Amino acid sequence: MQLSNEVQQLIRSTIAVKEEQLIRQLQEERRDIAARLAAKGLVSSSTRIHQDIDAIESFITKRMAAHVDSYLDVLLQLGIKVDLLLEAEIVRDLEGIANSGRHAVPPAISMSNQKSMLEAYKVRLGQADKQALAHGKNRVRLVRLKDAQPPDSPQLAVVHNHSYTAKGSNARINVDSTDNSSNVVRIDVPEMLDLIVQLSKAQGSPEIQQAAGEAKAAYPDKSVTATKIAAWVSLASSSAHLMHQALPYLTDIYHWLGI
């Protein structure tokens, strides 16, 4: 479906508020890096460059996540389901902002290797744009697949198995407690990845099986795992049944990755 002008305006205004905050945070962080390294006599060092790039990479990731959050939160509040047409519309918008790195300006410092410095910005920030876009697309795709599930379909029912481990002399687990105590949930990411591998072996092509194995092997490196699981989703999305069965595990993995 196509979003109405009112809904689009609501999403744009939500994005604008979040983006303004992120830009302000980025500017403050870059100034802090410059001041901190200047105090150490490293104002024109490669350390300054790499830390500056790190800050912009973080901004790129947060900015894309903010755009996706704004879309999905507003749609959820209004009860609007994501179909193929709406997914394509959201993805076009995400692709339109996936060039943050191209506009990043290196700090005005004197270095003998200006050319390599500029190349470092181009390569690293370009890669950050690609990864952020891939994660954003995957999140939208997962929501679209969830929204497409028949509510009364037992085949696509999500089953959650809970395991609790309590240790210590006064250990306890509180579920729906009345004493304001907290419950801590630990996601067993290796187990989730192993279940993805098992599903892929049962229903996927050799390419899908290989991608699942690579995602599992990448743990616990979050950056590599994110890249590998994105590659798996890209391949597995051709099988609606496989993706439906993997959704609860992917949700936990994405929660661990923070995307």
Image (cartoon, grey):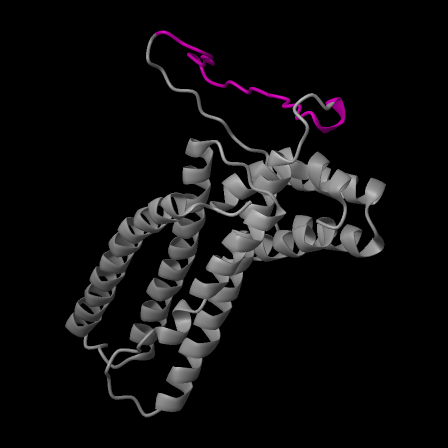
Q: Residue furthest front?
A: 5
Q: Is residue 131 visible?
A: yes
172 in the magenta segment: yes
Q: Position of residue 218 (x, y in %)?
A: 63, 53
Q: Which residues are magenta?
A: 154-178
Q: Residue at x 25, y 55 (%)?
A: 20
What secondary structure is the magenta-colored segment mainly? loop
From the viewer's perspective, is 135 left or right of 18?
right
Q: How many marks?
A: 0
Q: Position of residue 22 (x, y in %)?
A: 29, 55
Q: Residue at x 63, y 51 (%)?
A: 229
Q: Position of residue 30 (x, y in %)?
A: 24, 66
Q: Residue furthest top?
A: 178
Q: Position of residue 204 (x, y in %)?
A: 81, 47
Displayed quadrant of residue 54: bottom left
Q: Is residue 43 above or below residue 195?
A: below
The N terminus - image quarter: top right
85 in the magenta segment: no
Q: Is residue 102 above or below residue 207?
A: below
Q: Is residue 218 visible?
A: no
From the viewer's perspective, is 201 left or right of 243?
right
Displayed quadrant of residue 243: top right
From the viewer's perspective, is 33 left or right of 231?
left
Q: Is residue 247 above or below residue 9?
A: above
Nearer to us in this view, 137 or 197: 137
Q: Residue at x 39, y 68 (%)?
A: 100
Displayed quadrant of residue 46: bottom left
Q: Residue at x 17, y 68 (%)?
A: 35
